[in-house]
Amino acid sequence: MKTLRHRARPLWILAALCTLGAATSWWHLPESMAQTPAPMTLKPAPATPSPLTALPAPAGEAIAHTCAACHGTRGQLDDEAFMPLAGMPRTQFVRTMQDFRSGARPSTLMGHVADGFTDADLQALGSYFESLPMQEAAR
């Protein structure tokens, strides 16, 4: 048993030396590749940054999804607790939302909702709801 161990050791050492020799020869680079590259030159930043392009305003239909939980999808809901918005004239919608925002028309929730919209959003919402067909009255 001792003899086999003695013979295996030189093979292991020989394999390790060959691997080490191959690794070190790979690390040596030719002279042409060992040169340091020229430093990069950076361009100075412009004195004034270019203005960002504004994102397009979302369409009334996209904004109207926030109204769907109470007023129904596309402004129609089979519930008398909430006013249907479909078919409402734009000017009436905008005026009502502005009254909610200012507090001229009291509400527990709609004042907070109206605060989240810009005047342009209210115009877009009003145009969208005005374009929808009015819900038929239940018979």
Image: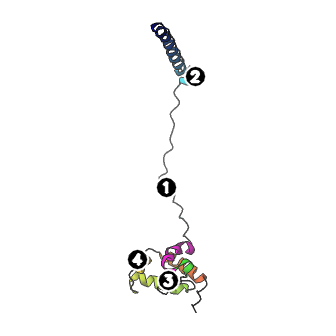
- The tag on residue 49 is 1
Q: Hey, what amino acid is under mark 3?
A: Val
- Earlier-in-chain disc, 3 versus 4: 3
Q: CA distance from mark 2 to mark 1?
A: 42 Å
- Determine whether the residue tagged by mark 3 lies in a helix, strand or loop: helix
Q: Residues within 10 Å of mark 1 (few under 14, many from 20)?
A: few
Cβ atoms under marks 3 and 2 closer than 8 Å: no
**Residue extending farthest top:** 3
Pointer 2: residues within 10 angstroms few (<14), some, or many (20+)?
few
Q: Position of residue 19 (x, y in %)?
A: 52, 18
- Which circle marks residue 94 in the picture? 3
Magenta stretch prevailing secondary structure: helix
Q: Give the number of the mark in front: 2 or 4.
A: 4
Above or below, 61 against 34 in this view is below
Q: Nearer the viewer, mark 1 or mark 4?
A: 4
Residue 90 appears in which quarter of the rendering? bottom right
Number of marks present in the image shown: 4
Residue receiving disc 2 = 32
